[in-house]
């Protein structure tokens, strides 16, 4: 660390980072440039806007296990609002940057590269660029203007310093091309969560409490004198719902940027100023806009939520369905799977739902960009219920967001509202099937009972004797004067079980019909069966064909033990040429009929859930680019 005295006010000025060449005096705001041991005063640095950031000079944290301290700051204004770049000094003396905008955070480092970097004019949103062996996509093209700086900085900055910037993203990484120099500067890093940085020495608790309380600016609309509010210095525009004027929040006089004329006054379901609890934190509803599908005319509402620590979130309402949406700091990977487009995020696949275009049809409240009625975006939606992955693209930027479906009751509870929300209509693109848990339990019970039935069936097969108790071969036709055949008695033993009568006849292009009687010798009880054996074959048009067979099986159920005999009364065709019939009586034959019947009946309930789920999915996908059924189905 090097310390010198400010040539303007004499206050000590510290240079903790070896690469820092500029510092802003914390007492008199003089801009000081280091020349060896001397400091040159370049004049006063412009005052920074209070953007409600919780980070300040002296804040400390940790990134990938290395401690750092915030030693400098640049505040920039670009088309979507304010952006802070916090200069970091790590314990290993490495210098880096923590970017902060709209509740998103990025850690980047200046990186040398041998790759040829494209000119700014050659870039376009969505373009794929390979940097240091990794593919990136251009996510944002914009111009920024420096508002001011503070602390130590590694280069010269000042009020009005302009530059063109391109932000690029991959599935896990983040890159910035800064065209303030030639060739452009390359910064590589990644998006991070606020909590993961383990920040300490944030803005003082009273300030933090004031921020959490809102620090709301109240003013009157310059057009109609309606009361309006601004909840954050990151707000760029305020839409007055009374006179339908869109005001410039950055202008002290709140000048009118544009006006719009709504077909009818729209009352948001959730009132502006409402406070709801999401992610374990309180969010204020500060803005509301409606969008319209430019092709089909469908409309939906989007509420802008703000929490000082977590930044901005969205609550989207469409036909009574709700989704809680946050902007992503990474680029999902789009690819084909089984010939269909999918997007992959953190190892999870999302199916392509539709491509569409939407325009803003109504606005009221505060927004962090210069919103206007009539502005359009191209939207691509991918779904994996209860989540929806969406890209909104213009010629200047591509923004990815991840939405989570919320039941109306959940939204009502979040806002502690006693007023019931409108009932959902139809099926939302990311709505989970409401009977998923009941279906899961039903299939689980079905599986358990199916296993039990299978074990019973296997046990039955193992315990079944399958014993042959009688067999004979009977020549047909019978002898002269003999009308039927009666077997000698045979013993059937064991528990009451089935008896299977197996018969086969060597008929050829003929048939035989057997009238069978199983007679209990001691009681005379008779069980009657009629069985036909027929077999035909030939050649027709050069192709062979056959019909029937020479074997047959018949089962008599619940036969008790005892002595039995078999009576056979054959019926033969008039042109019968003779055949031998082999008869075999088998006791206690394992049978799967009852098993399959029970399994079928058992499956009816879970199959009912499957059918309902299928109809639910057809309803979900009917208005997508990939409907599951045609209109005529």
Image: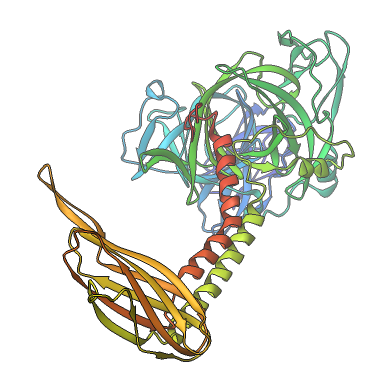
User: Is 470 left, or right, of 292 in this rendering?
Assistant: left
Foreground of the two, 153 or 401: 401
Task: Evaluate whether residue 35 shows in this view.
Answer: yes
Q: Position of residue 497 (x, y in %)?
A: 50, 82
Is residue 153 visible in the rendered structure shown here? no
Coloured how? rainbow
Query: How many numbered badges does the structure rendering display?
Result: 0
Residue 236: quadrant of the picture: top right
Q: How far from the left and from the top, in percent, is residue 592?
A: 45, 71
The residue lying toward the viewer, choosing from 434 and 290, is 434
**Left or right side of 538 for 17:** right
Q: Which residue is at the front of the view, 174 or 32?
A: 174
Q: Is residue 92 above or below residue 496?
A: above
Q: Please name the residue shown 47% across and 88% down the image.
A: 521
User: Which residue is found at the position 78% from the left and 11% from the top?
Assistant: 264
Residue 300: x and y in percent read 68, 25
Q: Residue at x 20, y 56 (%)?
A: 536
For residue 339, what is the image quadrant? top left
Residue situated in front as seen by the camera: 193 or 145: 193
Residue for point 37% across, 25% down:
119
Left or right, residue 537 beside residue 31: left
Q: Residue furthest left?
A: 542
- Residue 277, horizontal then vertical, whole percent: 79, 45
Q: Residue furthest front?
A: 481
Q: Is residue 493 above or below residue 155?
A: below
Q: Is residue 485 left or right of residue 38?
A: left
């Amino acid at each position: 660390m090097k310390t010198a005295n400010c040539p303007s006010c004499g206050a000590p000025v510290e240079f903790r980072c070896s690469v820092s060449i500029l510092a802003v005096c914390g007492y008199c705001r003089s801009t000081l440039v280091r020349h060896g041991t001397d400091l040159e005063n370049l004049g006063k640095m412009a005052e920074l806007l209070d953007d409600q950031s919780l980070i300040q000079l002296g804040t400390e944290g940790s990134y990938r296990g290395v401690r750092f301290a915030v030693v400098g700051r640049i505040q920039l204004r670009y088309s979507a609002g304010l952006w802070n770049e916090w200069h970091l000094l790590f314990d290993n003396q490495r210098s880096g940057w923590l970017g902060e905008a709209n509740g998103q955070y990025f850690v980047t480092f200046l990186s040398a590269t041998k790759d040829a970097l494209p000119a700014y004019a050659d870039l376009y949103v969505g373009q794929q660029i390979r940097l240091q062996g990794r593919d990136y996509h251009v996510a944002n093209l914009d111009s920024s203007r420096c508002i001011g700086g503070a602390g130590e900085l590694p280069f010269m900055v000042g009020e009005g310093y302009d530059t063109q910037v391109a932000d690029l993203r991959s599935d896990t990484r983040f890159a910035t091309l800064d065209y303030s120099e030639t060739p452009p500067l390359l910064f590589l890093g990644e998006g991070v969560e606020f909590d993961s940085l383990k920040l300490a020495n944030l803005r003082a608790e009273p300030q933090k409490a004031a921020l959490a309380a809102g620090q709301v600016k109240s003013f009157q609309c310059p057009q109609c004198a309606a009361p309006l509010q601004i909840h954050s210095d990151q707000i760029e525009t305020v839409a007055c719902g009374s006179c339908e004027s869109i005001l410039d929040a950055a202008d002290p006089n709140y000048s009118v940027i544009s006006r719009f004329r709504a077909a009818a006054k729209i009352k948001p379901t959730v009132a502006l100023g409402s406070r709801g609890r999401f992610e374990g934190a309180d969010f204020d509803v500060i803005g509301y806009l409606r969008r319209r599908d430019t092709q089909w005319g469908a409309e939906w509402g989007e509420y802008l939520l703000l929490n000082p620590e977590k930044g901005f979130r969205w609550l989207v309402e469409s036909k009574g369905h709700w989704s809680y949406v946050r902007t992503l700091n990474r680029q999902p990977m789009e690819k084909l799977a089984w010939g269909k487009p999918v997007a992959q995020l953190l190892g999870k696949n999302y199916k392509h739902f539709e491509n569409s275009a939407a325009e803003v049809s109504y606005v009221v409240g505060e927004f962090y960009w210069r919103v206007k009625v009539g502005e359009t975006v191209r939207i691509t939606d991918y779904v994996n219920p209860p989540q929806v992955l969406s890209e909104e693209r213009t010629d200047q930027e591509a923004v990815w967001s991840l939405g989570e479906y919320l039941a109306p009751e959940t939204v009502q509870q979040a806002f502690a509202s006693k007023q019931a929300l409108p009932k959902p209509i139809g099926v939302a693109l990311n709505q989970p099937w409401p009977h998923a848990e009941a279906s899961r339990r039903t299939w689980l019970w079905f599986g358990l009972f199916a296993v039990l039935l299978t074990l019973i069936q296997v046990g039955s097969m193992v315990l079944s004797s399958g014993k042959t108790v009688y067999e004979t071969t009977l020549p047909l036709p019978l002898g002269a004067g003999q009308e039927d055949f009666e077997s000698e008695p045979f013993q059937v033993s064991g528990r009451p079980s089935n008896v299977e009568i197996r018969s086969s006849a060597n008929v050829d292009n003929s048939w035989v019909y057997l009238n069978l009687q199983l007679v209990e010798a001691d009681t005379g009880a008779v069980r009657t069966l009629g069985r036909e054996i027929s077999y035909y074959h030939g050649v027709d048009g050069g192709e062979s064909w056959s019909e029937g067979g020479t074997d047959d099986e018949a089962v008599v159920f619940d036969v008790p033990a005892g002595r039995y005999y078999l009576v056979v009364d054959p019926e033969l065709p008039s042109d019968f040429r003779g055949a031998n019939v082999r008869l075999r009586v088998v006791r206690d034959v394992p049978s799967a009929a009852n098993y399959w019947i029970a399994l079928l009946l058992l499956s009816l309930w879970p199959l009912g859930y499957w059918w309902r789920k299928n109809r639910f999915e057809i309803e979900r996908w009917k208005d997508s680019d990939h409907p599951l059924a045609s209109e005529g189905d």
